[in-house]
Image (cartoon, rainbow, N blue to C red):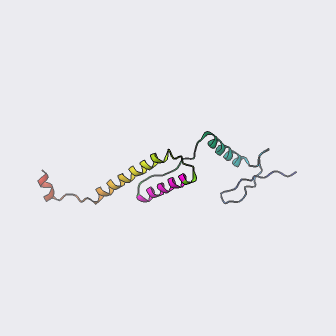
Amino acid sequence: MHARLCTGSTARGTLCRAVALTGSSFCFFHHRRGRRTRRQHRVGCVPAVRLGPLGDRAAILRALTRIAQALAAGTLPLERAPALLQRIHAAGRILDLRELAAVRQPLTLDEFLPIL
């Protein structure tokens, strides 16, 4: 008697080929993974969009790209996008202020004395 093999795919794209659970086409790992995805779909949950730290311009561009990809794939509800974009905008403003502060030169003594 032949054991039924898992029809899930590995990270490399090949068939899993582990022994499937009784009454299923998937092994333990792929069966749990599929159950979690079906539950998320049924409850209306969507996977989180991971933005990561927004410490420089490149990170902000990566975050914008992830949001655009999630919106295009339909995994990010349109209602959540404005809040994420506001946070990215705030991070950009903070970077602008940091860069402005770094560019300013300290006052010389001649410039400082009239202030006193």
* Residue placed furthest toward the top: 43
Magenta-tinted stretch: 57-71
Asked if residue 70 is among those painted magenta in the image, a careful observer would answer yes
The secondary structure that most of the magenta stretch takes on is helix
Quarter of the image where one finds residue 99: bottom left
Query: Where in the figure is residue 40, as x and y percent of width and height?
Result: 62, 42
In this orientation, which residue lies closer to the viewer: 100 or 44? 44
Position of 116 compared to 99: left or right? Answer: left
Please give the name of the residue rendered at 57% of the width and 47% of the height, measured from the top-left corner. Answer: 47
Query: Where in the figure is residue 13, as x and y percent of width and height?
Result: 68, 59
Position of 4 compared to 11: left or right? Answer: right
Quarter of the image where one finds residue 112: bottom left
Q: Is residue 57 above or below residue 116?
A: below
Please give the name of the residue rendered at 47% of the width and 55% of the height, measured from the top-left corner. Answer: 64
In this orientation, which residue lies closer to the viewer: 43 or 91? 43
In this orientation, which residue lies closer to the viewer: 77 or 10? 77
Q: How many marks?
A: 0
Asked if residue 84 is among those painted magenta in the image, a careful observer would answer no
Please give the name of the residue rendered at 41% of the width and 58% of the height, measured from the top-left corner. Answer: 57
Position of 54 compared to 50: left or right? Answer: left
Please give the name of the residue rendered at 44% of the width and 56% of the height, measured from the top-left corner. Answer: 60
Query: Where in the figure is residue 6, as x and y percent of width and height?
Result: 75, 52
Query: Where in the figure is residue 2, as x and y percent of width and height?
Result: 85, 52
